[in-house]
Image: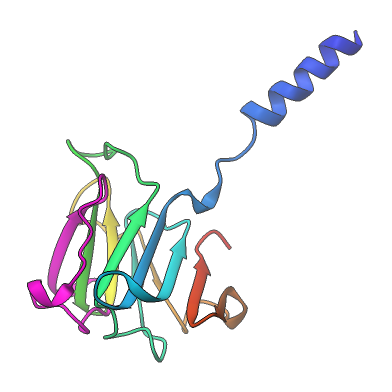
């Protein structure tokens, strides 16, 4: 009986444990070639527009990278797409990148977006719908954005 209870407990701990929220991550850098990170969004959600309206967040990004995204999107063939916009609410001029692989934008100036990014979204089910909008410094409490070593970290799961 003890062995059965122990086996069930192990099953619940491993199978029933939630997936770590920080698997999906987006990091923005102040300089080209991934230098001087200033925002790290951990647990980023798909179809969610992130407005970067905090002082020091908007119009600063010169490069970006990401990790933890699936190979295939849920609503279309191919991987999810990370799209950067020049206006809030995921509007304005934009440029999109596949989240699968390592084709990261090392210099947004090459596509006319250096120091112009105000919002971003990861499209998973389609390229139209925005399920939710999160605006840094309006929708988030200051305690969820912490500054350390010249980097701001935001855990989207909180």
Q: State whether residue 152 is above or below residue 121.
A: below
Q: Quadrant of residue 39?
A: bottom left
The quarter of the image holding the C terminus is bottom right
Left or right, residue 157 beside residue 107: right
Q: Which residues are magenta?
A: 90-118
Where is residue 24? Give x, y as percent. Answer: 42, 52
Q: Residue furthest bottom?
A: 55
Give the residue at x 27% y 40%: 73
Give the residue at x 55% y 41%: 19
Q: State whether residue 67 is above or below residue 53.
A: above
Q: Quadrant of residue 33?
A: bottom left
Where is residue 99? Give x, y as percent. Answer: 26, 50
Where is residue 136? Give x, y as percent. Answer: 44, 79
Where is residue 146? Give x, y as percent. Answer: 57, 78
Does the magenta segment cover residue 4?
no
Does the magenta segment cover residue 91?
yes
Q: Is residue 14 visible?
A: yes
Left or right, residue 68 beside residue 16: left
Q: Quadrant of residue 76?
A: top left
The quarter of the image holding the N terminus is top right
- Please name whichever residue, 41 or 105, is drawn nearer the observer in this view of the structure: 105
């Amino acid at each position: 009986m003890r062995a059965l209870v122990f086996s069930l407990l192990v099953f619940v701990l491993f199978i029933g444990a939630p997936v770590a929220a920080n698997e999906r991550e987006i990091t923005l850098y102040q300089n080209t070639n991934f230098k001087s990170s200033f925002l790290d969004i951990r647990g980023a959600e798909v179809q969610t527009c992130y407005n970067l309206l905090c002082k020091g967040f908007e119009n600063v990004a010169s490069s970006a990278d990401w990790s933890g995204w699936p190979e295939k999107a849920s609503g279309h063939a191919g991987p999810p797409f990370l799209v950067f916009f020049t206006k809030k609410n995921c509007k304005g001029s934009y440029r999109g990148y596949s989240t699968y692989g390592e084709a990261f934008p090392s210099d947004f100036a090459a596509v006319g977006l250096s120091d112009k990014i105000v919002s971003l979204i990861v499209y998973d089910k389609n390229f139209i719908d925005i399920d939710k909008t999160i605006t840094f410094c309006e929708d988030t409490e200051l305690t969820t954005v912490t500054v350390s070593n010249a980097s701001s970290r935001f855990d989207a799961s909180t």
